[in-house]
Image (cartoon, rainbow, N blue to C red):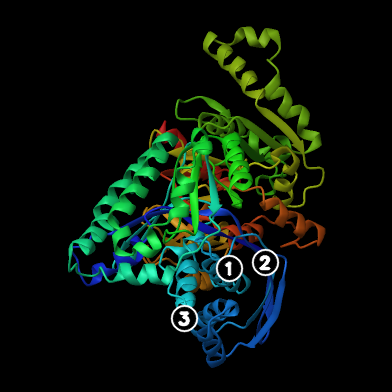
Amino acid sequence: MKLFVPGRICLFGEHSDWAGGYRRINSELEKGYTIICGTNQGIHAEVKPHPTKLILHSTLNNGFKKGPFEIEMQSDALLEQAQKGGFFSYTCGVAYQMFTHYQVRGLEISNFFTDIPIKKGLSSSAAICVLVARAFNRVYDLKMTVRGEMEYAYQGEITTPSRCGRMDQGCAYGKRPILMTFDGDRIDVQELKVNKNLYFVIVDLKAGKDTRKILAKLNHCYPFADDDIQESVQEYIGPINQKIVQEAIDSMQTSDAERIGELMRKAQKEFDTHLQPACPSQLTAPVLHKVLLYEPIQKFIYGGKGVGSQGDGSAQLLAKDEDCQKRVMQILEKDLGMPCLPFDIKTAKKLRKAVIPAAGFGTRLFPASKAIKKELFPIVDRSGKLKPAILAIVEEALNSGIESISIIIQDKDRELFEDFFFNRPFAENFKKLSREDQEYCDSIIHIGHNITFISQRVQEGFGHAVYCSREWVNDEPFILMLGDHLYVSDTKVPCTRQLIDVYELFNTNVLGLKIIEEEDLKHFGCVTGQWSKHKSILNITEIIEKPELEYAREHLHINSMGNNEYLALSGQYILNPNIFRFLENNIQHNIRHRGEFQLTSCLDELRREEGFIGYVLKGKSYDIGVPDQYIRTLNKLSFRS
């Protein structure tokens, strides 16, 4: 299993993590607020289980190989090594926490590439801690959420001599910008949406700072201020920072990059005014300010500020666009000899494509399915119009903003589908239609312009059908919709659009969910997990196909739900194209379930690698794939219309 964990950069709100922690002693202090994001660079590793040992092979960013380091997976040995400090201590600290709480076996980590600068305020130590926590979680399927990985990484790092802040392990969230709020021992994490690409430059100032001294001096200002300097420190890290962070969030959401740059300059100015007097030897930072004011780069940037604890470690600059980013890096490297790294925050790829498998025989609907494809079975929509099910599904996708649709079919059915979507009825029949139906007929042909038909030449399961769309999907996210499921929203927003809205908010894999009762477990793939503060959003920790009742009762039930209630897949999935890698592995190695290549096991593998969230749809999904469900669907839809 390959893993990558980035470093993290604090865009706004440095020092507010530990300062907000003092609210458990002094409740009059302001909460801590910080915006962080993962960097382009980080730590790459391959991981696999080991029966008895923790083993680390590592390659630093200068190409120098360290290790292998080896230690027995024993509590005392891990704790002793963690407390010694040094590079290997971070790995041992996290392993100690995982072993203590989960009694896991060993792990072998091959850190084959590291391109994040060390000791430059980018939390390289937190990145290795998160990587180790994630490795244990995914190798042993501990069903931890990203938040859980972040917490164990933090506990592991403070087991070492390191005294990192609580924001560092936010790199667990990857390259998504997040707002972290610190209130005593409580931490809230909110993912932020960026509506315009932002292009930063991280500058290695080639100077130095004493982070421990900075933290020691600033910590003296808490929990209660004794003089004007200490009051000024609390004023900046508290209410001034809160206001700047909120303005920055608003500017991200309104795509105002220029304002974000202005806020960076403002944050640095306020930092200098309020915090510099508390530790002038480290925070006067002449090299940092030379770079921030360097005249040749000013026309290419909106603003800039220090990184991490501040001082002469690193600087971050917000360039006006990608070309300006390159120019700034060239100037600083040539003129000042300062190494630079690009750092981008980009909007999520737009979700444009939908895949609809429709190649199955419809065994459970035989002999009707011998005469007509189940996807062409008639249904009555809310307007009272009788139409084939596949048309209702395609319209649902297009009405939700999807631009291109692929329908997976058998070769022998191509003419049938193409005739429906591409051709008018014979002229004499077309003339018999009302004007309204003639216009609707033409609209169906217009819809056909958005559809590509892909052949599944051999029917080898749901997973195989999805895999057939790999080349058409290319390197884009897509929504997978079942060809025998209909979706009816309880609101004005279609169910598919609801899922797309969730994807655009969180930029990750999303499963549509519905609530079912015990007697229906045998019909559905099911999930479990933990609710986020968005009550309808579930951080998924397991996906399983048609679970046995006893297993579901023990492992899948969610405490906040009724005793007889479970969460099942509704038949809509927004997926990263990495799903094809897992499907391809199953096909190449002939890994089947009940004789077919399935999707659900690959979904769970994708969950382990990238994470999944589930959304409980505000609406209903209707399965027309079995006779009684088809009849129930007709009755329900007729009633709703």
Report the side of 535 relative to 320 (left or right).
Answer: left
Q: Are marks 1 and 2 in contact (CB under 8 Å)?
A: yes
Q: Which mark is residue 45?
A: 2
Residue placed at 55% from the left, 33% from the top? 397
Where's residue 497, x and y in %? 48, 37
Q: Could you say whether the residue bearing mark 2 is in a helix, strand or loop?
A: strand
Q: Say what amino acid the circle numbered 2 marks.
A: Ala
Closest to the observer: 521 or 345?
A: 345
Check disc 3 and report the residue beneath it: 159
Q: Say what amino acid the circle numbered 3 marks.
A: Thr
Give me the C-alpha separation between circle 3 and circle 2. Answer: 23 Å
Where's residue 187, x and y in %? 35, 63
Please tell me in which quadrant of the rendered image residue 3 appears: bottom right
Q: Please tell me which of labels 3 and 2 falls first in the chain.
A: 2
Residue 592 versus residue 65 in the image, above or below: above
Give me the C-alpha separation between circle 1 and circle 3. Answer: 16 Å
Residue placed at 52% from the left, 47% from the top? 507
Question: Pointer 1: residues within 10 angstroms few (<14), some, or many (20+)?
Answer: many
Q: Quadrant of the C terminus?
A: top left
Give me the C-alpha separation between circle 1 and circle 2. Answer: 8 Å
Q: Quadrant of the N terminus?
A: bottom right
Closest to the observer: 189 or 310?
A: 310
Check disc 1 and report the residue beneath it: 131
Residue placed at 64% from the left, 37% from the top? 375
Where's residue 422, x and y in %? 70, 20
Closest to the observer: 127 or 532?
A: 127
Q: Are marks 1 and 3 in contact (CB under 8 Å)?
A: no
